Amino acid sequence: MTFRTRFAPSPTGPLHLGHAYSAMVAAQQALANDGAFLLRIEDIDQSRSRPHWEAQIYEDLAWLGLSWPVPVMRQSDRTMAYRTALDQLTDMGLTYPCVCRRADIEAAAGAPQEGVQQFGPDGRIYPGTCRGRAFPETVDHVVRLNVEKSVEQLGARAFTEAGPLYAGEYSLDAEALVQSVGDVILVRRGMAASYHLAVVVDDAAQGITQVTRGADLWEATQIHVMLQALLGLPIPTYHHHALIRDDAGKRLAKRDDARAIAKYRDDGMTPKELLGLIGLRP
Ligand code: GLU
């Protein structure tokens, strides 16, 4: 099987040093494995995505010396694919409409209890208030996955992490998914799909054999592997790289515009110098 990996930025702001690092690691992995480097524009959140940020992604990556096959996959074109995957999970009896608002969820969660985890990789662990609801739902709602039911239907569970931080063979832990992840959102209000659903559908559609991305998404990987297993999609190898830090050792925030690639470029830095700054060679 040909090695295929990807860089999947969201066009909601300028690419910064952390993005440059992630894109370069993915491209270098493709090169080392005689495979392909793909790009995907994760513009699923249309309220925050902007065409000029997408245009700048292409410009910045080309400036770094990267190239990728075209046409580029864009999540805003993929509504039908997400709908099909969602219908598949609904037909399996694994989804439900949830009408809760953030304040309802906080109120239902109540006071923190010792030993009970409150937050997981998808935010506050949902207390299950709407679990008994069924479609069709006329009230404005999101769609959630019933994780307790889902783990009973899991066939495949194994995945490989190839990155330097967590390298090893893993198996999904049903209890951890129920207790520390909970009923994740599959469709958000005003969006065609949640990040979790979109990312697994798209990685499969692009034939990705290795997901290369930052360690901030390591915890979400169990959600992605669970969805892949439920949907019968291939489970790629994962490679989570370290997050680059600034001189003071602080993790670079995704929204730190002072670290925008375009800013360094405008200041006259060469691509080689920028890569040196983040500890990479071109
Ligand atoms: N779109 C995500 C981001 O910009 C990356 C998702 C992924 O690589 O799985 O953080």
Image (cartoon, rainbow, N blue to C red):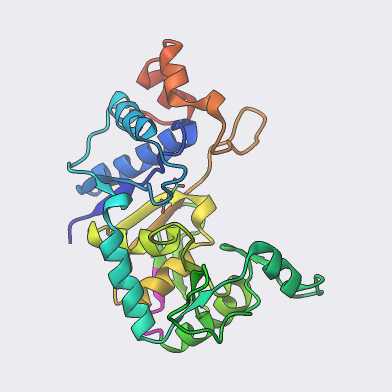
Q: Which residues are magenta?
A: 154-159
Q: Which residue does the image show at 62% across and 72% down from the upper left?
A: 126
Query: Is residue 109 shown left or right of residue 74?
Result: right
- Relative depth, front residue between 100 and 7: 100
Give residue 86's quadrant in the image: bottom left
Is residue 234 visible to the viewer in this orientation of the structure?
A: no
How many badges with numbers are in the image?
Answer: 0
Residue 129 left/right relative to 35:
right
Residue 255 figure quarter: top right
Secondary structure predominantly adopted by residues drawn in magenta: loop
Outermost residue to the bottom: 152
Q: Position of residue 123 (x, y in %)?
A: 61, 61
Kindly indicate the quadrant of the structure image that contains residue 20. Answer: top left
> Magenta segment: does it hold 158?
yes
Judged from this view, the residue extending furthest toward the front is 138
Q: Is residue 270 magenta?
A: no
48 shown above or below 279: below
The residue furthest top is 268
At x 46%, y 45%, the residue is: 47
Q: Nearer the viewer, residue 46 or 73?
A: 46
- 97 relative position to 120: left or right: left
